[in-house]
Image (cartoon, rainbow, N blue to C red):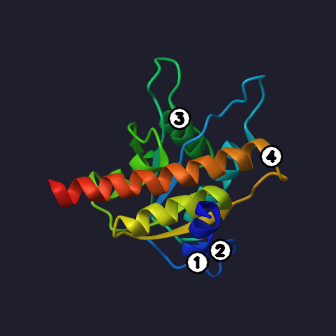
Amino acid sequence: MCYFSVSLWSIKKNYDNVQNIPYNTFGVVLGTSKYLYGGGINAYFKYRIDAAYFLFHRKKISYIIVSGDNREKNYNEPRMMKKELINKGIPSSFIYEDFSGICTLLSVLRVGKIFHQKKFTIISQKFHNERAVFIGNCLGLDVIGFNAKSLSFDYKIQFREILARIKAIWDIFIYLLSRNIG
């Protein structure tokens, strides 16, 4: 039920086509590892970077926030994403790093609180965008998603997403409850 509720909540706020997506000043690339555990480039990473580059050059966003995990000394998602975007030709002055986006909730929340953006485009794969858009809208933000190319159906990813959506609904409930109590 959680899985389908999140999908329905965000159905009209996710875009596959660059011609149809409205302009937002900021695009937010949600983090993932550049490399797979067994070696090689992570396709999810590559496709998110490609999508951000595409939106930037089509003037559908003016700035990019790369948000992700960097809790370990030798692992820094925002730095890896920024480096790839610069390698594609986007000037570093148009890219901001969020080093505390260790989960989707924090990435979306911090765009509002730290970067003072109430309206922005999230860039990730569709399954991830649906959850991020749901979270953003529950937080009172005007969030849309641009769906980066995805991979073929993967049971592990889908199972993980079911659990992530249950957790997202729980996290939103706890966050909103704590705001009302505090």
Nearer the camera: disc 2 or disc 3: 3
Task: In the rendered structure, find residue 155 and report the number of the disc placed on it.
Answer: 4
Q: CA distance from mark 3 to mark 4?
A: 24 Å
Dot 4 or dot 2: first in sequence order is 2
Dot 1 or dot 3: first in sequence order is 1
Please name the residue that numbered disc 2 is placed on. Answer: 18
**Residue type highlighted by circle 3:** Glu
Dot 3 or dot 4: first in sequence order is 3
Dot 2 or dot 3: first in sequence order is 2
Please name the residue that numbered disc 1 is placed on. Answer: 21
**Residue type highlighted by circle 2:** Val
Secondary structure beneath dot 4 equals helix
Mark 1, Cα crowd under 10 Å, few <14 / some 14-19 / many 20+, is: some
Please name the residue that numbered disc 3 is placed on. Answer: 77
Q: Do tag 1 and tag 2 residues touch (Cβ < 8 Å)?
A: yes
Q: Is residue 132 visible?
A: yes
Mark 2, Cα crowd under 10 Å, few <14 / some 14-19 / many 20+, is: some
94 vs 176, left or right, is right
55 vs 61, left or right, is right
